[in-house]
Structures are given as C-alpha cells and as structure tokens.
Image: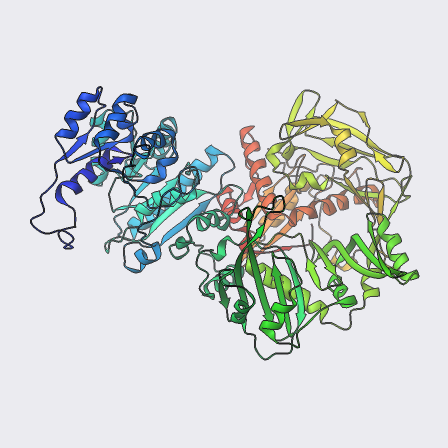
C-alpha cells in the first residue's frame, strides 16, 4: 500500500488494523481475522530485508518517499513479493518516481492487480489518471447525503506575489474573525509551494495576527517541533497554520474550514481535491471558504477551469458576492433555470462565439426536444433548457474519415455545441452552432415549417445605432453571364465598393464594421444569408442572449433603411499630405492597449521606463506644418514626425535619446514599431488618421459645438492659474488641488478620488462612484494657463480637450484601468511618494477589480 505522506500512512495502517467501518456496515463477518500490518518508515537496503518485511506482515503500508528512493533491486523484490499494489491519492501517478515504481508491477507476467484511489480523476500534470473506473462516488451524491458542504470562493487581486500574499492574508483574517464572532470554532490554513515561501508567510501572518498564534509545518522541521505545532492547532492554541502541502493528504481536522491558497496547484481539480478536505460535514461547524488570488482573471474564469475538470463541482462550488448586482442576478437566474440531461459538460465552461443565424417564426411555442430527431443514435448527447429565458443548449458528437488517409479506422471525433434562443414577442429564433450552417432543418423542427431565415437587405439594419461607424470589410456579388462574381473590399477600398454597389447595382453580400454602441466600442458583421457575428468577448450565456435581443430589435424595425445605415459610415481615403485641420489628440496604437501592461517597456537611450509611466502627446495643434508628437516619461522625451510617402506613413524620430520599445522579449526602435502599428490622431472636425488612412465624418454630419449651458464657471481667485499639479506636497494654490477639494467637499458623492497626475496618466484626477449594479467613472483634466491672466487661448483649449478625448478609451477597458491605477499607485509608493488616493484605498479598488464584470459602466462627462 503506497501513500504520499507519513500522516496518511498512519491513518491507512490504522484502518487496516481495525477494518475501519467494514464490520459495522456488515461487509465483513465478525470472525474475520485482523491482518498483520507493517508500517514501513525506513528504506530497505537489501532484497533479504524486503523478504523479512513481507514474511512478517499481510499488509505493508509505506510512502513513495520510502519506496521510490530504494535501490532498483530492492524495488524489484518488493514487486516480486507483493500480490497486489494499492495506491492512495493516485493523482500523484504522473510524477516520475510514482510512475517508475508502479511500472515494476505492471511489467509482471501476469500483471499484478493495481487498485488506485483518488478524489479526482486528474493527475497533477492535468491528465486523466489511467485505468478502468470500477467505482465512483459523485460529489453531487456526497453533498446530497450530507458528507460535503458548499464552498465559498473568495477572490482577491494582487499585482505581484507580495501584493497577493498580503491581500490573501488580509482576507483570511477577515473571514476567520467573522467565523469566530459567529461562534464557529474554525481554523485556517495557508498553503504554499516551498519551504522558503512558508517561512516568509509565517512571518507575515505572525506580524498581522499575533493573537491567533500562527504556526508553521514543513518537512525540514525536527519531528518534535512539527508535532508540537500540530498539537497547538488541535488544542486551538493556534488558529492559523502555514504549510507546504503537509496537511493536504492524510490530515483529518474537521475544524479546518478556511484554505488560503498562496500558491495554487497546477491542476485546479487537484486544488479542489485538496480543498475538499475543508468541506466535510459537521453540524457544529459552518461552510468552508477558499481564498485565492485571481490576478488578471475574474472569479468565474478561475472557476470555469475547475468546472471543466469535474462537472460535479457545479453543485458544490459557487463564487459568492455580497453585492446584489443586476448582472450577477441575471447570470445566476440564467444558469439556475436550466433543466435537462447534459451533465457531462457544465454550462459555466461554455465559451460560445458571439454569432447567430436568425429566423422568423409564427409558432405559439417551440419544441426544443424535437432536435434529437435530426441525429443518428449516439450523436446527440443531451440538452439543457431554460424554459423561462427560452434558451436551449445541446451537444453532438460525430466521427468523420480523416482526410489524409483511406484507412477506415483513422477517424476524427468532432464535438459541436448548438445554442438556440426563441423570442416569442418578436417571433425570432436565434441559432448559434460550432457546426457549419445554415440550420434551416433545425429551425423548422423546433418552431414549425413556416419558419424562414432572415435574409437580404434587412440584415444590414443591424448596423443601425452605431456611432463613428467604420466599414472594415465589404463583400459584393453580381451576375456575369451565367456565373456569379464575388468582390471583396477592405480598408480604404470600402468607400469605392459602396459607390460600385450603388452605381452598378451590385448586391451587398456581407459587411463587417466597428464603431461605438452606447459609447462603448463594438463590432458587428452580417451576411445577406442571415448570419450575424461579432468579435466582442462572450462572458457567459446571458451576454449572448442580450446580444441576440439587440440584433432582433434592429432587424424587426422597418423604419431602418439600408441606405441610411451606409450613409452614416465614416468613409476612409488615402492621403499623401496632412489635412489642414487642427489635430486634437493622439492615441497609443490599439495593440498596445490590449497587451498586459507589465509586458511593455519603453527605453530612452539606455534608460528603461515602465509603459504605465509613459505617455504620447501632440507637440502642437496647428492647422499646417508637420504633424509632430512626443513619447515621454516624467524625465525623458523623444520627438517624432509623421511623413506621408509611397502610399503609407513613416515615423522618424527627430530629437531626444534613441527610443525603443520592448514587448515581451522583443525589442525594436519605436519609430519602426509605429510604422508597423500606427498611433491614431483625432482632428478637430471629427475625422481620425491611422497611418495614411483618413476617416472623415459622413457627408452632412458635422461635429456639434459643446453646449454652452453645460459649461460651469468656477472661482479661481485663490488659485495660481499658472500652477497645474498639486505634486507630492499637495500644493494648496494649484489648479489640481482646487479640483480635488471641490470633489472632496461633495461629501459621500465619490467612493474613489485618485490623483493620477504624471506621464502615463488616465487623467489628472479619476473619480469612481459605485451604486447598486453601476459604476460611474469621471475623468477630471486640469490645464494651467499659458499666461499670467485668463484669456481666450485656443491652444490651451485644444490641449485639455485632447486630454479628455484621449482618456475616454480607458472607460471602455475597466479591468485594464484598475490594473493601471493599482500599478501606478505601487510605483508611486516604491519611490517614497505619498498615496494618490484622496478618497478610497487600494483594498476598495482591488475588490472592485475582482468583480468588475458584474457591473454596468457609465462614463460621466469629463471635467
């Protein structure tokens, strides 16, 4: 019998000696003789010693630390003398030592029986434990029969290891004290991967919670010290234990109810098998809590991996939030409302694409279960239906001949996801599937023979409502003789394609466009054959259903004309010289804003600067002359110019230390990087420039002047209008301090007031107001006067308006915005400067970041 730990060796040996509950459950007769059990706690050195051990016992229980370190001849003799091998905690079998030792038993002729026990069928390397399953006890059944209680998952966010360790420890203290205040006799465990980490964490917990007397346990401790620390835990003299997997297997202490995972296991399933020891039922105790750092991931994505490795955890684990947020409630209702027999694929693991083929229906009700009739036996695997939300999901599994051989046994197994949503009010059916469409047979099967696909010009109604609509791709078809010709237009050629479609009566086949919906960046594609798609991320099924509703509202509106939709699009054209319009703002290339910020570094000469502390700014706002801009930090600057030539644009550096950019491990000159991925320049007439492509507003559309009634005059008599930033010393007469004080005096209006002034800033001041289900973000931009007295200087206005226009991008990326703010706060404190928080704190921002997807976001007018 092989087990992973000393504690488990003792427990298993004791069970063999007493037969555990086998007699009590009448699995054995009373007269059954007890076996002689040997606890092997040293490494045998000779084959003769192995014989002596096996001659004196019926059962030998040892650890892999003992068996795996024995000489090869000794291990071979163990296999020769054994009549069977039992392995507990078999998810370790992926480790080389375990695999080699087990191989000695499988290589026997005939092979010896090998029985493996594990609470998860996944090895530590993520692969399945091999062998034939002869008995399983599902977690759902264990929970239903009272052996397991639910797990509460508490996510924290840390920018780096030290940050995450502190956040986890802080949350552990909060949860443990809450449980103790509720008169629950709970203990907490902090788990990490190495002994050095454990020592550091023990110091951290001892400093934070001396009254809880944290103890540490690891394999290099003297046995006496280790036993003393465990005894202190069992006596409740200590409430916190720090360990290196020492308590994961074979340690039974029901009061351990809080698990803080400073270093998670490689396999989420193994993590939960480990955590499962905290969930055992005891009427005197409460539910278990798991605390982990989700970093850049949100709670649900972390749990999705867990769901993927063992579907039964759906019934046991849930991410809890104290906030009653509309989106969270809708999502919960969506998942809880499903019924059906698709148990092998948890709904939380689904990653559907944002697409659908839309059908018009005329039925009183849909019959989703009839979908099974379309498939051969064994192909249809089951369906889940939410009758209230009218959403149905089913999965099919098929096999097809491999295309590279005629051998019949070479087949590809194909799994396909099919989603359906029926809107009875609009009489529309939406079908999304990973299988090739169309899905006319399926649509008619569930909604009747009168069901018809939405086709032709009306599909392009779905582009209605986009602001700053840019057509990225346009496909046209027309008949030529007996054949059909297809033309595809991209980039600046799309404008020509639209003119061609109108003048030559060509048929629009498909369009892909980007723009803004309700102030948020969005994309949408549509085909005349009734398919709609988007590259927007799908967080869950609720997102897909809402997206379908938005499509349906547009295609059902006869007041929307296709001509009107395409007239509202910005038309790109190639330019060879700069437009005679004042530039207002310049933005980093879009690709840099989708990168993880810590992966990017800009160097000025040999001085590297984090991307979070760099900015890109126009050098002037003139109508004529070269277009110049600078990339700068607080201490360095490099100036560039845009040169139009050969149908494109170049970005030579004109002054300053040679600038380069490092993304991951790749370094290149910044001028070369801009040539490959260009910054965007916004102009005062509403047009924008990317490389040498100028996107102008549609004909007849002009940029409306800012409403004068929304301009509020402040009293600046006590402010030095030449001093913009308050600085670390919080200069009382600065423009920024005047703004901060005005915001602070509004009382509880803001949960966060953050001074973000400096290169790389989001704004001079960022405020957040959190209400139920809504986060309102306001960016406040300050501008000092370029002269001693106030005046109508357009230059000053252009600068501050450009800052406001540029900062709007952050509102569309709340997760990145929070990461950026936290990073800048950390860098500020590392430099010995004061905190940027005028109201709120890092903990509040981290908590908001961990659950940002649960909220709706609204950008208030920039100040």
Could you say which is closer to the camera, residue 310 or residue 676? 310
Residue 144 seen in render: yes
Residue at screen point 69% across, 40% down:
591
| Residue at the extreme front of the image, as rendered | 407
Q: Is residue 632 above or below residue 688?
A: above
| Residue at the extreme bottom of the image, as rendered | 364
| Residue at the extreme right of the image, as rendered | 503
User: Which quarter of the rendered picture does the N terminus lie within?
Assistant: top left
Could you say which is closer to the camera, residue 299 or residue 701? 299
Q: Is residue 793 above or below residue 24?
A: above
Could you say which is closer to the camera, residue 82 or residue 155? 82
In this picture, residue 401 sits left or right of residue 196: right
Q: Position of residue 759 (x, y in %)?
A: 68, 34
Residue 685 seen in render: no
| Colouring rule applied to residues | rainbow
In this picture, residue 444 sits left or right of residue 219: right
Q: Is residue 489 above or below residue 504?
A: above
Q: Position of residue 166 (x, y in %)?
A: 43, 37
| Residue at the extreme left of the image, as rendered | 31
Q: Position of residue 31 (x, y in %)?
A: 6, 49
Could you say which is closer to the camera, residue 718 or residue 130? 130
Q: Position of residue 346 (x, y in %)?
A: 46, 56
In this picture, residue 703 sits left or right of residue 542: right
How many numbered discs?
Answer: 0
């Amino acid at each position: 019998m092989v087990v992973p730990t000393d504690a488990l060796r003792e427990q298993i040996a004791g069970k063999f000696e007493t037969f555990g509950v086998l007699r009590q459950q009448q699995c054995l007769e009373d007269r059954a003789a007890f076996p002689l059990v040997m606890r092997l706690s040293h490494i045998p050195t000779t084959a003769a010693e192995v014989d002596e051990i096996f001659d004196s016992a019926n059962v030998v229980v040892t650890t892999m630390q003992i068996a795996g370190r024995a000489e090869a001849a000794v291990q071979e003799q163990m296999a020769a003398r054994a009549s069977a091998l039992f392995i507990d905690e078999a998810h370790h079998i992926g480790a080389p030592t375990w695999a080699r030792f087990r191989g000695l038993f499988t290589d026997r002729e005939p092979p010896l029986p090998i029985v493996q026990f594990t609470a998860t069928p996944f090895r530590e390397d993520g692969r399945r434990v091999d062998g034939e399953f002869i008995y399983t006890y599902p977690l759902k059944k264990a929970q239903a029969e009272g052996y397991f209680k639910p797990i509460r998952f508490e996510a924290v966010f840390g920018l780096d290891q030290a940050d995450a360790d502190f956040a986890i420890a802080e949350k552990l203290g909060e949860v443990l004290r809450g449980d103790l205040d509720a008169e629950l006799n709970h203990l907490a465990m902090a788990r990490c991967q190495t002994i050095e980490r454990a020592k550091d964490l023990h110091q951290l917990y001892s400093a934070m919670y001396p009254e809880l007397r944290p103890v540490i346990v690891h394999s290099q401790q003297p046995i006496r010290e280790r036993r003393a620390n465990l005894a202190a835990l069992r006596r409740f003299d200590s409430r916190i234990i720090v360990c290196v997997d020492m308590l994961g297997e074979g340690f039974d202490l029901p009061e351990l109810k809080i698990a803080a995972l400073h270093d998670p296991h490689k396999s989420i399933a193994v993590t939960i098998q480990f955590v499962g020891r905290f969930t055992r039922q005891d009427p005197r105790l409460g539910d278990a809590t798991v605390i982990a750092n989700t970093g850049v991931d949100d709670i649900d994505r972390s749990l999705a991996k867990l769901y993927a490795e063992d579907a039964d955890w759906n019934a046991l684990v849930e991410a809890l939030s104290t906030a009653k947020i509309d989106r969270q409630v809708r999502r919960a209702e969506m998942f809880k409302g499903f019924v059906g027999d698709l148990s092998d694929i948890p709904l939380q693991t689904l990653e559907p694409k944002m697409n659908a083929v839309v059908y018009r229906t005329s039925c009183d009700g849909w019959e989703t279960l009839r979908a099974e009739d379309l498939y051969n036996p064994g192909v249809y695997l089951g369906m889940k239906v939410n009758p209230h939300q009218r959403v149905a999901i089913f999965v099919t599994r098929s096999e097809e001949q491999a295309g590279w051989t005629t051998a019949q046994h070479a087949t590809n197994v194909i799994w396909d996801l099919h989603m359906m949503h029926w809107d009875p009010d609009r009489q529309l059916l939406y079908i999304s599937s990973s299988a090739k469409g169309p899905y006319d047979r399926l649509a008619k099967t569930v909604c009747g023979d009168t069901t018809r696909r939405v086709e032709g010009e009306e599909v392009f109604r779905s582009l209605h409502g986009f602001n700053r609509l840019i057509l990225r791709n346009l496909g046209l078809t027309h008949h030529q003789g007996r054949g059909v010709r297809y033309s595809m237009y991209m980039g600046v050629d799309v404008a020509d394609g639209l003119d061609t479609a109108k003048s030559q009566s060509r048929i629009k086949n498909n369009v892909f466009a980007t723009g803004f919906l309700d102030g948020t960046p969005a994309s949408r594609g549509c085909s005349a054959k009734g398919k709609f798609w988007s590259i927007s991320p799908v967080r869950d099924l609720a997102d897909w259903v809402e997206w379908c509703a938005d499509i349906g509202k547009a295609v059902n509106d006869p007041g929307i004309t296709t001509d009107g939709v395409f007239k509202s699009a910005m038309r790109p054209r190639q330019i060879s010289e700069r437009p005679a319009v004042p530039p207002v703002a310049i933005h980093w290339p879009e690709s840099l804003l989708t990168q993880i910020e810590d992966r990017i570094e800009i160097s000025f000469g040999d001085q590297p600067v984090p991307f979070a502390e760099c900015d890109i700014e126009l050098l002037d706002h003139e109508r004529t002359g070269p277009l110049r801009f600078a990339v700068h930090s607080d201490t360095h600057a490099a100036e560039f110019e845009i040169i139009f030539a050969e149908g494109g644009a170049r970005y030579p550096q004109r002054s300053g230390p040679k600038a380069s950019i490092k993304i991951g491990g790749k370094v290149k000159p910044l001028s070369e990087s801009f040539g490959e991925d260009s910054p965007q320049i916004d102009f005062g007439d509403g047009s924008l420039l990317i490389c040498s492509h100028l996107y102008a507003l549609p004909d007849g559309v002009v940029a409306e002047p800012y409403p004068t009634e929304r301009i509020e005059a402040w009293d600046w008599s006590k402010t030095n209008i030449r001093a913009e930033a308050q600085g670390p010393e919080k200069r009382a007469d600065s423009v920024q301090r005047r703004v901060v004080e005005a915001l602070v005096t509004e009382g509880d209006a803001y949960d966060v007031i953050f001074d973000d002034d400096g290169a790389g800033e989001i704004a001079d001041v960022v405020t957040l107001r959190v209400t139920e289900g809504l986060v309102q973000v306001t960016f406040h931009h300050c501008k000092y006067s370029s002269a001693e007295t106030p005046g109508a200087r357009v230059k000053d206005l252009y600068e501050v308006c450009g800052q406001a226009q540029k900062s709007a991008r952050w509102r569309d990326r709340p997760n990145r915005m929070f990461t950026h703010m936290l990073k800048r706060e950390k860098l500020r404190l590392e430099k010995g400067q004061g905190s940027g928080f005028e109201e709120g704190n890092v903990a509040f921002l981290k908590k908001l970041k961990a659950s940002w997807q649960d909220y709706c976001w609204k950008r208030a007018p920039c100040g």
